[in-house]
Image: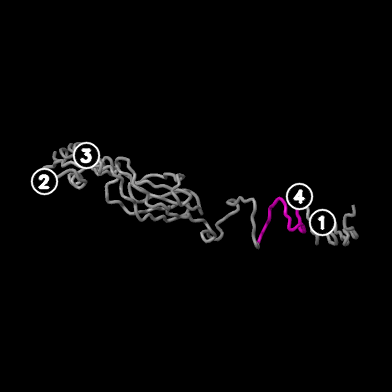
């Protein structure tokens, strides 16, 4: 009878476990929301936050509003310092010193020249003193500026007048392992080499200084010179010309 009683209680225990799991998940979600983990604007403000920001006083167990100068709170944030730009392959990673005063966000600006002349562009914003510019270009030089913006939308000064530069890295032969580039990965209009060890050659035509010529049909012409006295060999004949360019000897197809 005791075993039957315990078995009958199982559905109730499972239901309680599910309810406890749902309750724990809900509490975790609420705590993450209040901590500002999802959106900093949802973070709960504590008494310490209010007294630390000024305008409030906590004493004798009560919180009182002491007042503040609204014009002062709307002043522009301080200037950002120590902007560093570290370049990688098709990207630039930016860091700077964290501002201890309350701000809403940082703005990151970029230009192709070192001066602020109105052509700079706003890349984006960030809540932390970190930003990655994934520009997708290699071997390109960019200049960067950062400034802070407060909750009223008032921007502070740029970190400097002259932009902080960085040149994105390029892929060189040092970055390529031997034997990793295959023919299906190459499509070039002109390929130059000092020397080459070639196996089978598949090409439309070949011309080496007009002295060794192979056309797209496989017809070959070898000549010691392009004019004057010369020896000329083709698929079907051997010809000899004198210094005036007159044909003197023909061996092979006399037609």
* Residue pointed to by mark 1: 234
Residue at (74%, 50%) from the top-left corner? 216
Q: Earlier in the sequence, mark 1 or mark 3?
A: 3
Disc 3 on helix, strand or loop?
helix
Instruction: Tell me the mark number nearer the camera, choosing from 4 and 3.
Output: 4
* Residue pointed to by mark 4: 217
For the N terminus, the image quarter is top left
Viewer-side residue, 247 vs 243: 243
Residue 28: quadrant of the picture:
top left
- Categorize mark 3 by other alpha carbons within 10 Å: few (<14), some (14-19), many (20+): few
Residue at (90%, 54%) from the top-left corner? 254
Measure how far apart labels 2 and 1 are at the Cα level: 107 Å
* Residue pointed to by mark 3: 23
* Residue pointed to by mark 2: 59
Measure how far apart labels 4 and 1 are at the Cα level: 13 Å
Q: Earlier in the sequence, mark 4 or mark 1?
A: 4
Membership of 91 in magenta stretch = no
| Residue 162 left/right relative to 224 | left
What segment is highlighted magenta in the picture? 196-216
Membership of 204 in magenta stretch = yes
């Amino acid at each position: 009878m005791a075993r039957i009683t315990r078995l009958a209680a199982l559905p109730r225990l499972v239901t309680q476990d599910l309810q406890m799991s749902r309750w724990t998940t809900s509490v975790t979600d609420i705590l993450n929301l209040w901590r500002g983990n999802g959106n900093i604007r949802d973070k709960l403000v504590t008494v310490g936050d209010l007294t630390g920001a000024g305008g409030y006083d906590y004493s004798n167990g009560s919180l009182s509003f002491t007042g503040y100068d609204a014009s002062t709170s709307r002043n522009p944030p301080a200037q950002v310092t120590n902007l560093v730009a570290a370049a990688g392959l098709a990207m630039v990673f930016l860091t700077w010193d964290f501002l201890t005063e309350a701000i809403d966000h940082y703005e990151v600006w970029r230009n192709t020249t070192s001066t602020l002349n109105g052509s700079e562009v706003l890349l984006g914003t960030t809540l932390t003193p970190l930003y990655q510019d994934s520009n997708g270009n290699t071997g390109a030089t960019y200049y960067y500026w950062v400034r802070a913006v407060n909750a009223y939308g008032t921007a502070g000064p740029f970190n400097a007048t002259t932009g902080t530069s960085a040149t994105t890295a390029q892929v060189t032969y040092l970055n390529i392992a031997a034997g990793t580039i295959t023919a299906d990965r190459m499509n070039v209009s002109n390929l130059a080499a000092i020397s080459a060890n070639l196996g089978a050659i598949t090409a439309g035509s070949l011309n080496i200084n007009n002295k060794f010529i192979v056309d797209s049909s496989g017809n070959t012409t070898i000549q010691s010179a392009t004019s004057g006295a010369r020896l000329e060999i083709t698929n079907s004949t051997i010809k000899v010309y004198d210094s005036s360019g007159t044909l003197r000897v023909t061996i092979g197809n006399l037609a």
